[in-house]
Image (cartoon, rainbow, N blue to C red):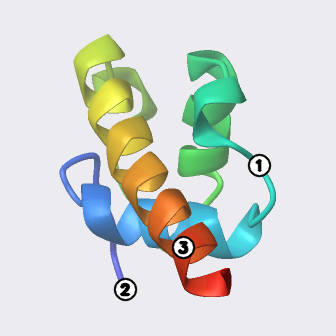
Amino acid sequence: MNLSWTDTEDIALHLLETHPNVDPLTVRFTQLHSWVTEIPGFTGDPQKSNEKILEAIQMKWLEEYRDSKEDQE
């Protein structure tokens, strides 16, 4: 599967799977950028990201993270 910067939900799910115990709000954008570009199948141009895109990914990841914590309760 090829992912680009606009695939926020798929990216968020991958981040949740690979970093299940990381609170997304504790991740700096520089680290988030690195993790996203390292996703297998990610084909987005690393130079095409910006704060708005990274924030959208982080917020989607946070939503998935919170949902997963609720499911565990």
Across and down, in percent, residue 67 comes to 45, 70
Tell whether 64 sits left or right of 65: left
Q: Is residue 56 above or below residue 4?
A: above
Residue 31 appears in which quarter of the rendering?
top right
**Residue farthest along the top direction in this orientation:** 51
Report crowding for label 1: few under 14, some 14 to 19, many 20 or more residues within 10 A (C-alpha): few
Query: Residue 1 — which label?
Result: 2
Asked whether the residues under the numbered discs 3 and 2 touch, taking CB atoms below 8 Å apart as contact, a structural biologist would say no
Give the amino acid at mark 3.
Glu
> How many discs mark residues in the rendered view?
3
Q: Residues within 10 Å of mark 3 (few under 14, many from 20)?
A: few
Residue 20 place in picture, x, y as percent: 74, 66
Across and down, in percent, residue 48 comes to 28, 26
Q: Which mark is residue 22?
A: 1
Work out whether mark 3 precedes mark 2 in sequence or the reverse, and give the earlier one.
2
Does residue 40 appear anywhere in the picture?
Answer: no
Q: Pinpoint residue 54: horizontal percent, then vertical percent.
A: 38, 29
Q: Amino acid at mark 1?
A: Val
| Residue at the image point whose x is 55% and y is 47% from the top | 37
- The residue pinned by badge 3 equals 70
- Cα–Cα gap, marks 1 and 2: 24 Å
* Mark sitting earlier along the chain (3/1): 1
